[in-house]
Image (spheres, coloured by chain):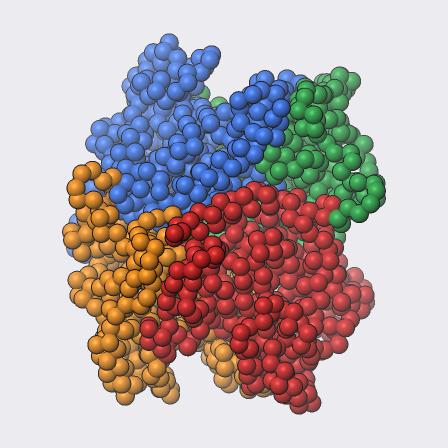
Chain colours: A red, B orange, C blue, D green
Amino acid sequence: MIRFTTAGESHGQALVCILEGMPAGIPLAAADVDEQLARRQQGYGRGRRMQIERDTVELLAGVRAGETLGSPIAMMVRNRDWKNWSEIMDPAPHAGDPDPRRRAVTRVRPGHADLAGVLKYDRTDARDILERASARETTARVAAGAVCRRFLAEFGVRIGSHLTHLGGIDATRPEPMPADINAAADSSQLRTLDPAAERAMVARIDVVKREGNTLGGICEVVADGLPVGLGSHVSWDRKLDGRIGAAMMSIPAVKGVEIGIGFEAARRTGAEVHDEIDRERDRPLAGNVRRRTNRAGGLEGGMTTGEPLVVRVAMKPISTLMRPLQTVDLATGGPAAATAERSDVTAAPAMGVIAEAMLAIVLADAFMEKFGGDSLNEARRNYDGYVSHVAARLAD
Amino acid sequence: MIRFTTAGESHGQALVCILEGMPAGIPLAAADVDEQLARRQQGYGRGRRMQIERDTVELLAGVRAGETLGSPIAMMVRNRDWKNWSEIMDPAPHAGDPDPRRRAVTRVRPGHADLAGVLKYDRTDARDILERASARETTARVAAGAVCRRFLAEFGVRIGSHLTHLGGIDATRPEPMPADINAAADSSQLRTLDPAAERAMVARIDVVKREGNTLGGICEVVADGLPVGLGSHVSWDRKLDGRIGAAMMSIPAVKGVEIGIGFEAARRTGAEVHDEIDRERDRPLAGNVRRRTNRAGGLEGGMTTGEPLVVRVAMKPISTLMRPLQTVDLATGGPAAATAERSDVTAAPAMGVIAEAMLAIVLADAFMEKFGGDSLNEARRNYDGYVSHVAARLAD
Amino acid sequence: MIRFTTAGESHGQALVCILEGMPAGIPLAAADVDEQLARRQQGYGRGRRMQIERDTVELLAGVRAGETLGSPIAMMVRNRDWKNWSEIMDPAPHAGDPDPRRRAVTRVRPGHADLAGVLKYDRTDARDILERASARETTARVAAGAVCRRFLAEFGVRIGSHLTHLGGIDATRPEPMPADINAAADSSQLRTLDPAAERAMVARIDVVKREGNTLGGICEVVADGLPVGLGSHVSWDRKLDGRIGAAMMSIPAVKGVEIGIGFEAARRTGAEVHDEIDRERDRPLAGNVRRRTNRAGGLEGGMTTGEPLVVRVAMKPISTLMRPLQTVDLATGGPAAATAERSDVTAAPAMGVIAEAMLAIVLADAFMEKFGGDSLNEARRNYDGYVSHVAARLAD
Amino acid sequence: MIRFTTAGESHGQALVCILEGMPAGIPLAAADVDEQLARRQQGYGRGRRMQIERDTVELLAGVRAGETLGSPIAMMVRNRDWKNWSEIMDPAPHAGDPDPRRRAVTRVRPGHADLAGVLKYDRTDARDILERASARETTARVAAGAVCRRFLAEFGVRIGSHLTHLGGIDATRPEPMPADINAAADSSQLRTLDPAAERAMVARIDVVKREGNTLGGICEVVADGLPVGLGSHVSWDRKLDGRIGAAMMSIPAVKGVEIGIGFEAARRTGAEVHDEIDRERDRPLAGNVRRRTNRAGGLEGGMTTGEPLVVRVAMKPISTLMRPLQTVDLATGGPAAATAERSDVTAAPAMGVIAEAMLAIVLADAFMEKFGGDSLNEARRNYDGYVSHVAARLAD
């Protein structure tokens, strides 16, 4: 069982993450994490902060001489902007001027956690909520995901993503998909595989930015190289679909998730949905069969099938608008324009990177659950034994 | 924290469920559960089994004199068909003829857990998998959900659902929605609120049945009467969106979930998505504000807003087709037509009832998390204190 | 990860248990469970109920043709006395005479959960508490433990126990211990390995029984055949010591637990406590070393060492005394003699059997955590790979 | 539900802790944590490192302006010795000389995690194990515990500890106990309340130190001011005894735990063990009753009774001896004297402080479970409601 916990406020000192339960012996360098952190920060339509931050990780615990130790891995990503916020966000009790709360956020933003959070946690300053509800928190998720994908890479698992929709504009999915999705997607400033759509999206962002408005989008995440049998059908909370659903829906601003053809599956007949099965040599991970199609998106009965795992995630537009929406002011009780804190136009391109990280965490957990093992060697030995066994089931 | 665990095979002796963590003093009768079990079994297009079963619950533990005790609640729903299956499904070691495995299922069905399960769990008879991967398991979920909704009802929470799509046919959402969704939906044989669509759906089912094919659909689940602040923004796995995502995606055959306007939110601008906020008296549950719209579906920042919670769930067609798909036979390794065990054309109408149950479980858990309390009285006292406090925040 | 949940009241219809997370393919018959249930019911000094009950299990789910399926295992042990209690304990709402609560328990027993439970759960009848706080609940634990020990037996793990103390009388630990502890202990009516002490204990029980008083005792539980490396040092809640501590201290009436020489370790110097290590061939489970002593009780740094795991558990006397203690009456608020419901003099001999079950559950969980595997074959393959690897570490 | 995770190696960069699930609004300053960290470092018989470290915490997340935010609280305690170890413990992959593993630890220490850990995690250098298995990890526990005790203090809960035994020398428990245990204990260099015993203990430490040997001890932890009804009888893993057992047995080197009179309870009759109950005004936390004695140590049926909670914990001697024990050398396979890394003679005095921290965490968790609440105000409102209710149960 893998456990991962994040901490950190958007303008606090640092984002922190502890990833617990990874085996010993995984090769890991700070650069492996930094590479993913950089990917999270890319994307046309991001605001000034992405330039400020340029995140780098400090491996505080759990790694020695370039290898994991099996102990909890603690990672810290400092907020480079901290010096500008150290007074407002100071953890120390306030003594004398200036009062960190003198600039309290009270004009709560529609679509954000501000209002619900202030009421739930009994705060007067919505900053106490928004600092944690911020997408900045996903930095820590990406760091944890980077370790998990490093682990999965040892088993040939590769996780990529691309943007399939942005603010009303669809990107056409290339057929066939590139072998290395991220190599292609990361070279696009919007992480889309459709250059024509990309141009339209950029134009759309420019317009919407001038309007002080924001945009959402849809990403597709694909994991290749998975063996059949991750997850389980036996209990509701072991099903991989549900665990993926939880992971994706927990990403800030995500409002929908689907696997394989997803909602479209509800519109077709069974014959048009279910993937027929053929024998095929040299596909040991799938038990030496192949689905003629992959509408199931690599999951049947809560388990991987050995086909690529395909997940799509829908993100709503950013909820901080420079042309603010109508709301109430907590301080006066009267109507007000919502607070407009510095923000991006869209976070949808980066969302794919975050969704990759969450998928990596879910999959690494499913790996550990199935294969056990306290060292990479042991996990690999167990994995190899299983794959050999599965491959032999339908052998000639 | 509520824990719920289910057990039981489709043609085994019984479905069993333990629901742990409910407070003492909740009024509960077997009839409360049976009513929900009956709702799960309705729906045009169901096969013969629905007539056979007519489920009733036995309250084995945790309830006395019509009240919960605070101890784990164990419920059992016997499979009435058991006498016909007691030999095939006998738990006892096989001694002499007939061999329970002589009728092994080896022509694994596309879309079902059969193949992945057999490989993962190292079985030769796919019956060892399909008996648990069956939708029959949801009986136990509905039983647990019935207890949770009985608890929630004490706080004025009402959960309903209706079918919005079936096999290519959309139902129009009535405007305004009926005050009691289930009163309306349960009087429809497909649990839809659009009579014209219902007629078309029935005709569609009849056609598809003749073809030996199957259908999926989409349900919408709505929870009314929730206070602001269930769930949390502080950690990925406390966000209510994620917990709902997990619960819904864990329902057999579900391939997608969305909250509020869901995927549509990715297509619009922020100004067209986020719900502006007005002061409004006499809405204590929402902190005396109202969203002008409810595109967020009652969730912001992983927390309830006090507006109705709206979730939509997409189910793929049933994977057992009477006109079977192509597959491999595990016994021979060669191609074969998939097993065609008795089955319905569609389970989509019932899926809404199951989704209601899962939502009830998630919400009861979120209630317990926020309000604590070991008795209904204590939970109510804590709830009342919170609602009073929240209502006073923006009081004049 | 193994999860196990129990339900059931002492005089309710049945005890129920769901054990989730066991692999498929474990040979299991009802007799395997019944054997352990019978062991729990033995022991001089038990009251009449032990004769009434003669527990037998019904395997409701998760087992087919004498093998586990990998799905949740549901077990039910009916209370044979139910017919005499069906009115008092009826789950149905009370309608008409006789009122099940007319015989409410209000003279709360010192030492029992009665008073704290009634206050916490806001009940007026302590029966609502004591029915669940009863030692009868351990029946369900023993059932779950029986499945776990069946699993562990496949790896050569053997768990036994014996009584080392009863009500002031020490039993001398034989040196060397018998190879099969339970074969010896189960032939004693008090489960002790010291015949002289047994005679004194029986006499003590007889005296104390006449006085209307009760006795506690101490059991020692030993697990043989464990490989080095179960548990972990990396996180507080992965340490096997802690998990054993939780399991043992959760047994009703247990007030202390110690591992190896336990409290005695605090009285000696390091040189007198720590077990020196020698090379020794043919001990693959321990990495081909041997501790010269086993004062650590088979655990170092939260992990098994390959030496026998030794745990001692102290149980207080039964809290229902036939010559009752002084208490308050909840109904009157005034002083009263505590309720004296039918009870045993001592449950200490049976406690060893319960502690064995709890240890089996903890160890099976630690096995699954380390070795993973969804089938017994897979778990064994992983186990064999690990043991070979460990054995080769110090090979010549 | 509170979750707490620690990370950090003994000579790594820092110890890190994330405490998740605490409500908002708890007053908290770094000094509150530092005070506890300092208490952990006191004690006669500690080695040089205690002087080196003088731990101070950095509140990285979850605290603003002297109050918790409800978000995860991340704390970091730097290892001041890091500069001397940064090469050996460098997380970066090794490139060029000097090889951080050139000083590999291979002469594994009896009593420590060294050997089991190296085999389990497949390491060649026992430093990869011992760095995490070190008692230094408890720094992070004490930090988390400091936050929990700050929370509990708001409800009048006070947790103290004192040393009752050290290496063969008993301290007499004063009668009555001082009202403020820690005020008395912290003024003793061994944290004992018996000055005569303290002198003997100091002399014993001096002797044992000269011998290159080590000592263990026993601490008693007491929590005052707890309301009746924390914990539960309903499920094995909700019982407070079990949760305390887990917490205490997870402390490095702890080999035994007992509650109330503990093991002694097994030696007496029921009449000599169970605490008779009297009405008594002005004890609202206990439901206006008093136990005439507190042999149960404040726990009945897995729940607090309202009497002081009393736990005793036994620690074995430190396993690093300056006059080393016999072991094997992993590098050669041959016999060797165990590694002798710098170490203390005894950690028993500090162990009480760690046990206090663990108890604070368990109790804060039980508080949150019972009272819920997302802010201190809400938790207090719920608490007050419960205490009023309980106090009225037996009111005249």
Residue at coordinates 64% horizontally, 62% vertically from top-left? A142
Q: Is residue C384 left or right of residue B163?
A: right
Looking at the image, residue C370 lies above or below residue B55:
above
Residue at coordinates 58% horizontally, 71% vertically from top-left? A178
The image quarter in which residue D187 lies? top right
Closer-to-camera residue (B4/A97): B4
Please provide percent x and percent y for residue B111: 36, 65
Looking at the image, residue D184 lies above or below residue C267:
below
Please provide percent x and percent y for residue B122: 38, 47
Closer-to-camera residue (B93/A291): A291
Closer-to-camera residue (B162/B341): B341
Q: Is residue D282 left or right of residue B126?
A: right
Residue at coordinates 31% horizontally, 82% vertically from top-left? B193
Please provide percent x and percent y for residue D78: 77, 47
Please provide percent x and percent y for residue A371: 50, 47
Residue at coordinates 39% horizontally, 60% vertically from top-left? A279
Q: Residue furthest top?
A: C196
The answer, for residue A139, to whether it is visible in the render is yes
